[in-house]
Amino acid sequence: MSVYRILKMLNIFILLGIIISVFTILSLTVLYFTDISNYGLDFKIKIGGSELIGNQLDLSFRIWLTLIIYILLGLCLLFFARIFIKNLLNKQIFIEKNFKTIRYTSYTLAAMSIFNNLPQNFILSEIIDNHKVLSEYINSSFSINYGLLIAAVTVFVFSYIFKEGIRIAEENKFTV
């Protein structure tokens, strides 16, 4: 299988990921603004011995907002990957647009490392506060996803290597 076919398939998968992310954002927005129990739907959350029905859990604006922000960051990663793959398919490798795309990808990964566990921490703190669930075994403290942070730094360094490749490619254009 050629590299061109692999990139084409990857491009299709990324497009599907973008569609799924947009659908997830729309679904979360509808879930936030609609009481699903009116339609006979419900969900359960079980923590230890306590079980909470979805309509007992008030998904606050901060939970909804952090979920949307995290999904939007993932959506940005998908868009950046799609831009980069399209440029590779067009045989435009060492260009300024790819450098900027790689740089923005590193910024997005850094933001994702911060927002990684905020939604679940907000949900846990709301469950602990409102439903008096025993919190001695639940850790809802703020933490950074160091794997994503290391990936962000690695991609940032890669962008500098790419910038140097752009400079070398420009020099080679003028060499006879």
Image: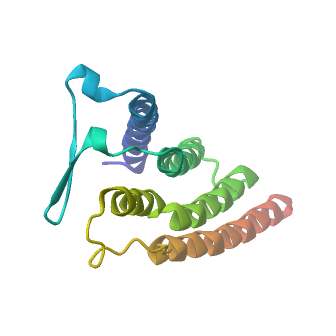
Residue at the (60%, 45%) spot, across then down:
87
- Along the horizontal axis of the image, is 125 left or right of 101? left
In the displayed image of the protein, which residue is found farthest to the left?
Answer: 49
| Display colour scheme | rainbow
The answer to which of 136 and 15 lies nearer the viewer is: 136
Location of residue 78 in the rendering, given as x and y in whole percent from the top left corner: 50, 46
Q: Quadrant of residue 138?
A: bottom left
Residue at 58%, 69% in the rendered image: 155
Task: Report the side of 92 relative to 38 (left or right).
Answer: right
Q: Horizontally, is 101 left or right of 40 in the view?
A: right
Say which quarter of the image contains residue 154. Answer: bottom right
- Residue 85 in the image: state x and y as whole percent: 52, 47
Q: Is residue 117 above or below residue 28?
A: below
Residue located at (62% from left, 71% from top): 158
User: How many numbered circles are shown?
Assistant: 0
Residue 8: image x %, image y %? 42, 40
Residue at image point 72% right, 53% down:
95
The quarter of the picture where the C terminus appears is bottom right
Q: Nearer the viewer, residue 130 or 42?
A: 130
* Closest to the observer, 5 or 126: 126
Q: Where is residue 53 drawn, in percent x and y? A: 22, 44
